[in-house]
Image: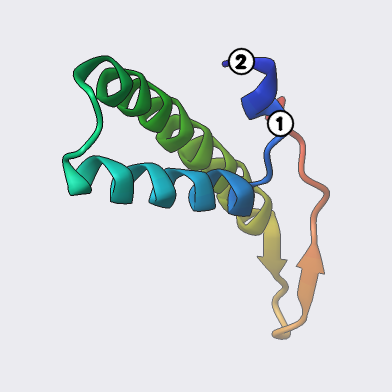
Amino acid sequence: MSDTLVNLSFEQALQELEALVRRLEEGRLPLEEAISAYERGVALKTHCQAKLQLAKLKVDQIVLKSQGEVELKPFDAGE
């Protein structure tokens, strides 16, 4: 993943992806630009999916204790 993607938040990546999709759907891009936009879109989609997966893993660390109390178990990516 490129450095520029690593620094993008989920929201920023999703916004850029949505803009690329709109441009591609308009069908007015020259072929080479359309291919580049598609490639960037695939990278953005992968980036967003990774961010969502990480968020899911963090949420999965919330544990419900026996008396209905919620305990936050620290997220450990190594588990």
Residue 77 has which mark?
Answer: 1
* Residue displayed at 41% across by 37% down: 45
Relative placement, left or right, of 17 versus 28 is right
Q: Quadrant of residue 69 in the image?
A: bottom right
Q: Identify the image quadrant of the N terminus.
A: top right
Type of amino acid under label 1 = Ala
Q: Dot 2: few (<14), some (14–19), or many (≥20) neighbours within 10 Å?
A: few
* Residue 64: % across, % down: 67, 72
* Residue 51: % across, % down: 59, 42
Type of amino acid under label 2 = Ser
Question: Along the line of sight, which residue is nearer the eye, 65 or 14?
Answer: 14
Question: Along the line of sight, which residue is nearer the eye, 22 or 2?
Answer: 22
Q: Which residue is mark 2?
A: 2
Q: Are marks 1 and 2 in contact (CB under 8 Å)?
A: no
Give the CA separation, mark 1 to mark 2. Answer: 22 Å
* Residue 58: % across, % down: 68, 51
Instruction: Look at discs 1 and 2 and give the one toward the viewer.
Output: 2
Secondary structure under the numbered disc 1 in the rendered image: loop
